[in-house]
Structure formats: C-alpha cells, structure tokens
Amino acid sequence: MTGELSPIDKAKFVAAKRAVDFVEDGMRVGLGTGSTAAWMVRCLAEVVRQDGLKIRAVPTSTRTAALARELGIEVVSLDEAKWLDLTIDGADEFDGDLNLIKGGGGALLQEKIVATASDQMIVIADAGKEVGALGAFPLPVEVIPFGWQTTKALIEEMLVSIDVLGRSTSLRMNGDRPFVTDEGNHILDLHLGRIGNARQLAMVLNQVPGVVENGLFIDICDVVVVGYGDGRVETRDINQGTVETEKLDFVESENLFRDID
Ligand code: 5RP
C-alpha cells in the first residue's frame, strides 16, 4: 500500500509519524485538520491501539472528530479538556519564524482556538510549505454570513494601506454555493502574493466588523516537523533553536492505510 503513496504523501506521512513521538501517556492533545493531520490521526490511533497509550483528544473540525472516533481515539470537547498539552496540525505555509498561514481546509477558527489553548503547537508539513515570506497561499479569513459583501469591501479598503503585493479577495465556494465552516460562517480568500508585515495584518483584519478570525498564526507554533518524500524528517524547535534530521522507514500496516468510510 505504501508503494502507492506519492512523494508528497510520503512526506506528509513521515512528518505526521515523527510528530506523534511527542505525545505522551495521559496527555490532552489537539488534533488538526487536513490531509497531513489525517495521517497524524492515523499514526496516533496506531499508538493508542498497539501500545495502549491513553490520551484525550480535542479535534479541530467535524471531519477530524469523525476520523478520530472511527479509529478509536477518545474525543472530548475543548471545554471538557479546558487546556491542552499539545496540538499537532498541518499548515498551508510556514516561514522561518514558524509563523503560519492556515485555513486551506476551512477549519482555521477551531484550529486557532485549540492551538492557542495548548502548551505546545507542532506543525507537520511537507517541505513545499516553507516560504521566505507568507502570502503566496491565499489567506483565509472567516467572516459571518450577515453582510459578508460589506465585510469583503471593508477588507479590500483596509488592504490599500497594507504592505502586500495583491489585493483581490474571493468568497470560497463549495460547488455553486458559498463554503460553510463548522461554525456556519463563510471564508474569504485574500490573494495577497506576499505579506510584508504578517503581525500587523493579523491584528488589523480582526478589527474589521464581520471578521471572526484570520488564518495568520503568529507566535503560536513552537515546532515544525518537515517531511520529505525520501523519508527524511527535520524537526525544528523555535524555542530551543534546535534542528534535528533523521530518516524514517515506511512501515506497512493494513490498519494505518485502510480506507475510512
Ligand atoms: C485546515 C488547515 C490545514 O492544516 C492546511 O490547509 C493544510 O492542509 P494539508 O495538510 O491538507 O495540506 O489549515 O484548515
């Protein structure tokens, strides 16, 4: 089965597998959303099943919650867990300071709440997600449906005075309807090309009425685990200033790669 994985899926898989090493018995763990996070949930479920690791998990979307439950991970709400030891999630982009763009999967609101309520956030990503400056990936901004066109216009007006390359915005669609998040909101994607000052933009965006949250994660991520298609993983810890490289084997496991309904 692993022979069928593309290099990018192998990269996501090894990053996910390495990040699961950070999970210890008794921890409360935030589970991210997206294809890389789904590998992590599968790897984590293997450790729960095989080694009897006891954890309580807080998923960041209905999708991740369904996968975790299906694979036998105990799922609790953030209000039940109150605070988390660790969150492991993917990202759409990360820079050298481990600032991120997230929300490509539309789950940025829960992802930001959960990551912020964690002692540590670990991002898992294939090497293609690393950028010199954030912004090539369209920045997702969650807005309430009421008056979303006005919110969009206000954001565009605000962007005129912001250091970015592009300023177009678009409503994310799901077929011929607006995409709806788990909280019943919409997503505006901001096509900025390059963000000069991500910290400033993150603060200014959240002051626009109608904006619920934006996909810039500034000073939230502590560790990034970067996966490569040949099995190499690089673990960078921004607080400790360390970089460790190792090579992981692809382990055949029917359970790990089985299809989930
Ligand atoms: C979902 C996210 C994801 O973490 C991000 O989109 C990366 O996804 P993938 O691992 O599928 O590339 O932010 O809201």
Image: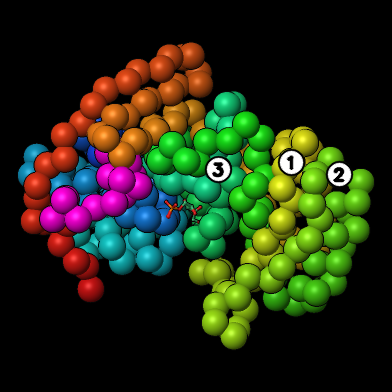
**Considering only order in the chain, which callout, 3 or 1, is on the residue closer to the N terminus?**
3
Residues packed near mark 3 inside 10 Å, few (<14), some (14 to 19) or many (20 plus): many
**119 w.r.t. 177: above or below:** above
Q: Answer yes or no: do the residues labelled 1 and 3 have beta carbons within 8 Å?
A: no
For the N terminus, which image quadrant?
bottom left
In the rendering, which numbered label is found on residue 195?
A: 1
In the rendering, which numbered label is found on residue 161?
A: none
Q: Is mark 3 within 8 Å of ligand 1?
A: no
Tag 3 residue: 93
Whether residue 215 can be seen here: no
Question: Residue 228, position in %: x, y?
Answer: 34, 35
Queried whether the magenta region covers residue 64, the answer comes back as: no
Mark 3: which secondary structure? strand
The residue furthest top is 241
Mark 2: which secondary structure? loop
Question: Residue 21, position in %: x, y?
Answer: 25, 32
Tag 2 residue: 162
**225 w.r.t. 175: above or below:** above
* Separation of marks 1 and 3 at Cα, in angstroms: 12 Å
**Considering only order in the chain, which callout, 3 or 2, is on the residue closer to the N terminus?**
3
**139 w.r.t. 144: above or below:** above
Residue 179 relative to residue 233: left or right: right
Q: Quadrant of residue 190?
A: bottom right
Q: Quadrant of residue 134?
A: top right
Residue 84 relative to residue 238: left or right: left
User: At label 2, which amino acid type do we have?
Assistant: Ile
Q: Which residues are magenta?
A: 1-15
